[in-house]
Amino acid sequence: MMLDKADLAQEARTLDAGDRISSICAHYEQPKGWIFFDANSVGPAPKTARKAASDLMDDWVNLRRRGWAERDWVDMPAILGDRIAPMIGAGPGEVVVCDNTTVNLYKATGHALAVNKDRATIVTQAENFPTDLHVLQGFERFCDRPVEIRHVDTEEEAIAAMDDTVVLGSFSHVGYKSGIRWDMEKINAAAHEKGALVLWDVSHSAGAVPIDARGSNADYIVGCGYKYLSTGPGGPAYIYVRPDLAERAWPPMCGWMGHADIYAFSGNYEPHTGIKRFISGTPMVGANAIARCAADIYEKYEPGDIWARHRSLSEFFVRALETMCGKLGVEVTSPANYDRRGGHVSFRAPGAGRVVEALIDKKVVASFRKPDSIRFGISPTALTHQDIHEAVRRLHDILETEIWRDPKYENVSV
């Protein structure tokens, strides 16, 4: 039975009162009056990030080159990798934090092509994120053998597309527009049965919903850290490669920091063992210093508790949206089943992009994707159920009064 608006307000208070890890919100800066639903773009800022940035400036001024010896700048890709590994179901020594998602997509794709040299077909989603598609198109043009890209729309089509010509399936775990979550374990098993490998981009799921690199027998996982993992705007990305797979080929991007002995300064490349061979250039010391602040928070909580909190927040958001705004034209387009949904919830509403602009004036930050998709990224580390109820109330006011029709909201951003 659908709850009424008063019931929802009380439910929000009750859920917050019973939240076992509500303390996680205290680790992040929360501007008064604002409610942010853009964790699928830039996650909340840890309170310790300002001091970390200031400390780095002190090191820059006072230590300069001595920082490489007196600080853990060189080791930070592996340190951070171990910190966030549990959030993607990986173990110690299986993840490194480095570069950006695009670069890591390139590394994983090139490695797969080197492992399966007699295959040249890549299967991917037709609506995969643009950068994922662009990386594949680059290999299609410049690979040392003809590469064919097959586009699919559904999991069933992806499984059906797997045959003995497929070298790699390259998929987003969660669709950036729809919020649809794919079944990693099922896809991995189907690909492996045909001798193919699978690369997953978990940018829209890591830090929000369960990911099990080991349990699903994933081959490659990459993602950005600046969304739900809150490593800061443009923060470093990460890469996981199945341990028994990593050393079957050189990384396609060989660099100094991936060498077996970086201080040998050898002119001849010898790849490091395991995941560290996928580090390429000099660590992003400044970005890593800020990223560490978020990684420190994740160490304090069990991943399962964070995922459970996201589920509660996300399911409450859908209920509130349908109850308070359903009669005003709102239609949830993300899957109704939570286990098929990612970090954000997508929905349609009259005015769409204009509504998102009007929400900013109401101190609610969401995002818009053409043609008509409004996305609310649900941060499990910074939002409460009462925040969600209040944000949906403000959305209701915008739709009911049709204030979004004001000409000042014509210039729609993303």
Image (cartoon, rainbow, N blue to C red):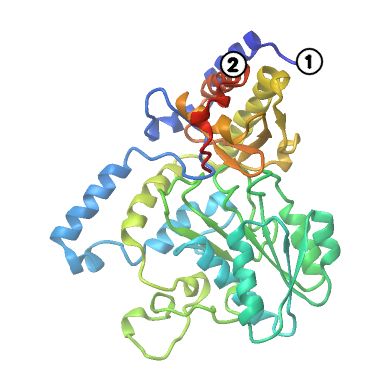
Residue 317 spot, x, y in % from top left: 63, 27
In which quadrant is the N terminus drawn? top right
Spatial CA distance of label 2 from label 1 is 27 Å
Q: Amino acid at mark 1?
A: Met
Q: Residue furthest right?
A: 160
Name the element at disc 1.
Answer: loop
User: Identity of the amino acid at label 2?
Assistant: Thr
Above or below: residue 74 compared with residue 386 = below
Label 2 environment density (alpha carbons within 10 Å; few <14, some 14–19, many ≥20): few
Quarter of the image for residue 264 reads: bottom left
Q: Residue furthest front?
A: 407
Q: Residue furthest bottom?
A: 268
- Does residue 214 lie above or below 3 as drawn? below
Quadrant housing residue 106: bottom right
Task: Say which of 336 and 330 sits in front.
Answer: 330
Q: Does residue 383 appear anywhere in the picture?
A: no
- Give how far across and how far down residue 243 sits, in percent: 59, 69
User: Across the whole image, how many numbered discs are drawn on residues?
Assistant: 2
Q: Which residue is mark 1?
A: 1
Q: Quadrant of residue 147?
A: bottom right
Please tell me whether mark 2 or mark 1 is closer to you in this view.
2
Q: Nearer the N terminus, badge 2 or badge 1? A: 1
Q: Residue at x 48, y 27 (%)?
A: 22
Please, which residue is most extreme toward the left here? 62
Q: Residue 401 bears which disc, if any?
A: 2
Q: Position of residue 71 (x, y in %)?
A: 26, 61
The mark found on residue 122 in the picture is: none
Please indicate, yes or no, whether residue 109 appears anywhere in the rendered image.
yes
How many residues crowd around disc 1 within 10 Å: few (fewer than 14), some, or many (20 or more)? Answer: few
**Disc 2 element:** helix
- Say whether residue 352 is left or right of residue 188: left
Left/right placement of residue 15 relative to residue 371 reads left
